[in-house]
Amino acid sequence: MKNILRIDSSLFLNNSVSQQLAQELIAELTKDDNNIKTLRRNIAKEGVPHLDSEWVTALATPAAERSPAQQDKVSYSDQLIKDVQQANILVIGAPMYNFNVPSTLKSWFDHIARAGVTFSYTSDGPQGLLTNKTAYIITTRGGMHKDKSTDTMVPFIKNYLAFIGITDVNIIYAEGLNMGAESREAGLTTARASISALLAA
């Protein structure tokens, strides 16, 4: 049994292009295999609490000394980590908002990064522990940013995933979505072609 973890972070929920493309990608990934299970987290709808001093303190407190409220916080973060640990494939919808990822997606990343669990410090530097996974990042943009200085989010995502051990990362771009109907259609065509090429490789 293979597991796909799908993370949706668009503010537009079911009307979003990233969700539409994620659905199409997963349909292709699973069409010839009945032994694939998909877990979906719509973090834009569900929300993801931002880490604060109380949350970090709870994570740092030994289990036997945690208050019930602290244990609730740790259990929440533990579940998000477990989702990733159990996944073979990650499909992450990452629209660009103000040159970076949505704040809920950044918060989800923050919960996943935990020393000794998803990465470790060694004499050679940090070592990611979430290995042997493939990630597909679907990034949607109103304008054109690929390979430009304005695209700060893709380097961030790649660096973050490598930090926790995920180095097989595939980026699917859908750009120019707010630049008129022709540009929008071209952006969707490019994204779908990328999906086809990745799955054919």
Image (spheres, rainbow, N blue to C red):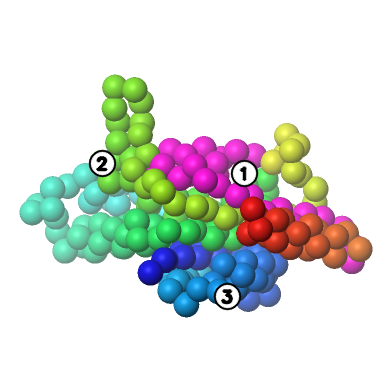
**Mark 1 or mark 3: whose residue is earlier in sequence:** 3
The residue carrying pointer 2 sits among few (fewer than 14), some (14 to 19) or many (20 or more) residues within 10 Å by Cα, namely few
Query: In this image, 187 relative to 59: left or right?
Result: right
Q: Does the magenta segment cover residue 160?
A: yes
The residue carrying pointer 1 sits among few (fewer than 14), some (14 to 19) or many (20 or more) residues within 10 Å by Cα, namely some
**Mark 2 or mark 1: whose residue is earlier in sequence:** 2
Location of residue 193 by image quarter: bottom right
* 55 shown above or below 123: below
* Magenta residue span: 152-181
The kind of residue tagged 1 is Met
Which residue matches tag 2? 116
The kind of residue tagged 3 is Lys
Task: Check the image and name the residue furthest to the top.
Answer: 123
Secondary structure of the residue carrying numbered label 1: helix
Q: Position of residue 184 (x, y in %)?
A: 84, 63
Q: Nearer the viewer, mark 2 or mark 3?
A: 3
Secondary structure of the residue carrying numbered label 3: loop
Query: In this image, 65 relative to 97: left or right?
Result: left
Residue 92 visible in the shown view: yes
Q: Position of residue 149 (x, y in %)?
A: 73, 34
Residue 12 visible in the shown view: no
Question: Marks 1/3: CA distance?
Answer: 31 Å
Q: Quadrant of the N terminus?
A: bottom left
Relative to the observer, which residue lies in front, 15 or 182? 182
Relative to the observer, which residue lies in front, 159 or 52? 159
Q: Which mark is residue 153?
A: 1
Relative to the observer, which residue lies in front, 85 or 34? 34
Question: Marks 2/1: CA distance?
Answer: 26 Å
Question: Marks 2/3: CA distance?
Answer: 37 Å
Q: Residue at x 45, y 45 (%)?
A: 166
* 11 shown above or below 66: below
Which residue matches tag 3? 31
